Image (spheres, grey):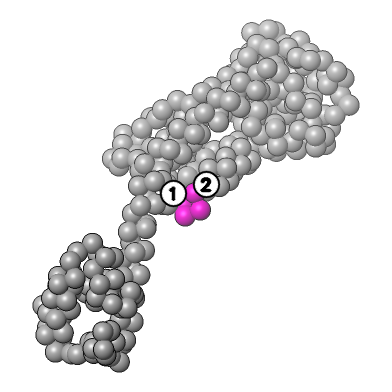
C-alpha cells in the first residue's frame, strides 16, 4: 500500500530535480528522502530514477506517474484553498430573500459591496412578499430572509432590524414639494395613493390620519410601494411609503419629504430555528444591520 509521504517525496524530487533539494523542501534529511523513494519504487515495482554521474534523472515511467500525482495534488490544493477561504469568509454560498422594498435596490447594492472583497462568494437573491419570504426560510430554501414584522412561525427565528420611518412622496413641481416636512393636514383633499389593506404600513398610515381628523381622496390602491411611487411620478397623487423604495424614485418625477408624526416600519431578519447560520451569513447580517441603521439615520436627518 502506498504511503502518502512516499508520494510527497517523489513529487518533491520531481519538482526540485534532486534528492538534496527535495530534502530541503520537505525539511527532512537527505537519507529520509532516499529511503522514501526506494520504498516507493519497491511498492510500485518501477524504476523511477536513474543515476547519471552525480545526478538522478526521472525515467519515462516517473514522468507519466508525476502527471497523475500532480493532478491529485492540484485537487488537494484546491480543497485546502477552499477550506482557507471558508475560514476567512472569502468563499461560500448565500441564499437571501427579501420583501420588495429592500429587494428593489437597497439590498442589491449592499450585496454588491459585500461581494467586492469576496470574489469566491456566490449569492442567490429572491424578492417577494414577507409571507413568502417566511415560507422560504422555513423550507430551507434560503438562509436569510428580510420581511416586515410581526412574524410568528414555529421553525423560524425573528430578530428586529433598526426601524425606519416612512416618508411622503409627491410629484416634482407639486405644491407640497416646497415644504421641508409634511404633516397630515397637508394632505387634506389630496388625491392619495394607498397601500393594500393587508399591509401593516397601510393600517398605521390610516390610523395616523384618522387621529388627526384628516380626510384624503384615496384614489388608487396597490400592494407594492414601487407602483405607488410610479403613480406619484406620473402626477396621479401623493403617497406615504417606505424610504427604501422612495429612494429608487428620487429625481425621477418624485420628491421625498419627511413625514410627521413618524410612522415606523418594523423589519426583521428571519432565520431557521433548526439550522445554525454559517460564519459567512453572520458576517453578512452584521454588515447589513449597520447598513440599515446608517440608512435610517440619513433618511431621518
Instruction: Answer whether residue 270 is visible to the viewer in this image.
Output: yes
Quarter placement of the N terminus: bottom left
User: Would you name the residue on which mark 1 appears?
Assistant: 90
37 horizontally vs 253: left or right: left
Q: Within 10 Å of the Cα at label 2, are there few (<14), some (14-19), or many (20+) other Cα atoms?
A: few
Res 118 label: none
Residue under the image location 61 percent in, 37 percent down: 106
- Tell me which corner region of the image, top left, top right, bottom left or bottom right, holds residue 291: top right
Secondary element under disc 1, as helix, strand or loop, is loop
Q: Position of residue 20 (x, y in %)?
A: 25, 72
Q: Nearer the viewer, residue 23 or 9?
A: 23
- Tell me which corner region of the image, top left, top right, bottom left or bottom right, holds residue 128: top right
Q: Which residues are magenta?
A: 118-122
Question: Which SS type dominates the magenta stretch?
Answer: strand
Sequence-wise, which precedes: disc 2 or disc 1? 1
| Spatial CA span between label 2 and label 1 | 8 Å
Q: Position of residue 105 (x, y in %)?
A: 63, 40
Does the stretch in magenta take in 120? yes
Amino acid at each position: 500500500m502506498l504511503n502518502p509521504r512516499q508520494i510527497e517525496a517523489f513529487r518533491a524530487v520531481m519538482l526540485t530535480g534532486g534528492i538534496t533539494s527535495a530534502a530541503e523542501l520537505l525539511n527532512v534529511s537527505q537519507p529520509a528522502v532516499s529511503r522514501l523513494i526506494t520504498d516507493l519504487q519497491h511498492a510500485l515495482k518501477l524504476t523511477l530514477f536513474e543515476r547519471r554521474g552525480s545526478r538522478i534523472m526521472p525515467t519515462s515511467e516517473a514522468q507519466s506517474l508525476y502527471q497523475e500525482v500532480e493532478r491529485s495534488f492540484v485537487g488537494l490544493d484546491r480543497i485546502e484553498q477552499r477550506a482557507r477561504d471558508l475560514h476567512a469568509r472569502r468563499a461560500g454560498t448565500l441564499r437571501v430573500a427579501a420583501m420588495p422594498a429592500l429587494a428593489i435596490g437597497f439590498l442589491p447594492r449592499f450585496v454588491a459591496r459585500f461581494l467586492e472583497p469576496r470574489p469566491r462568494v456566490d449569492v442567490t437573491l429572491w424578492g417577494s412578499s414577507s409571507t413568502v419570504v417566511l415560507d422560504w426560510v422555513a423550507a430551507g430554501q434560503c438562509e436569510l430572509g428580510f420581511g416586515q414584522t410581526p412574524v410568528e412561525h414555529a421553525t423560524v427565528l425573528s430578530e428586529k432590524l433598526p426601524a425606519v420611518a416612512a416618508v411622503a412622496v409627491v410629484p416634482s413641481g407639486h405644491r407640497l414639494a416646497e415644504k421641508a416636512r409634511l404633516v397630515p393636514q397637508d394632505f387634506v383633499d389630496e388625491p392619495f395613493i394607498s397601500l393594500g389593506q393587508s399591509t401593516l404600513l397601510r393600517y398605521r398610515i390610516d390610523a395616523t390620519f384618522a387621529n388627526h381628523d384628516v380626510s384624503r381622496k384615496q384614489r388608487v390602491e396597490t400592494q407594492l410601494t414601487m407602483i405607488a411611487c410610479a403613480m406619484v411620478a406620473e402626477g396621479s397623487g401623493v403617497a406615504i411609503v417606505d424610504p427604501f423604495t422612495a429612494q429608487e424614485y428620487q429625481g425621477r418625477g418624485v420628491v421625498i419629504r419627511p413625514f410627521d408624526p413618524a410612522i415606523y416600519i418594523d423589519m426583521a431578519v428571519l432565520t431557521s430555528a433548526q439550522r445554525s447560520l454559517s460564519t459567512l451569513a453572520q458576517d453578512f447580517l452584521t454588515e447589513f444591520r449597520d447598513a440599515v441603521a446608517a440608512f435610517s439615520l440619513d433618511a431621518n436627518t
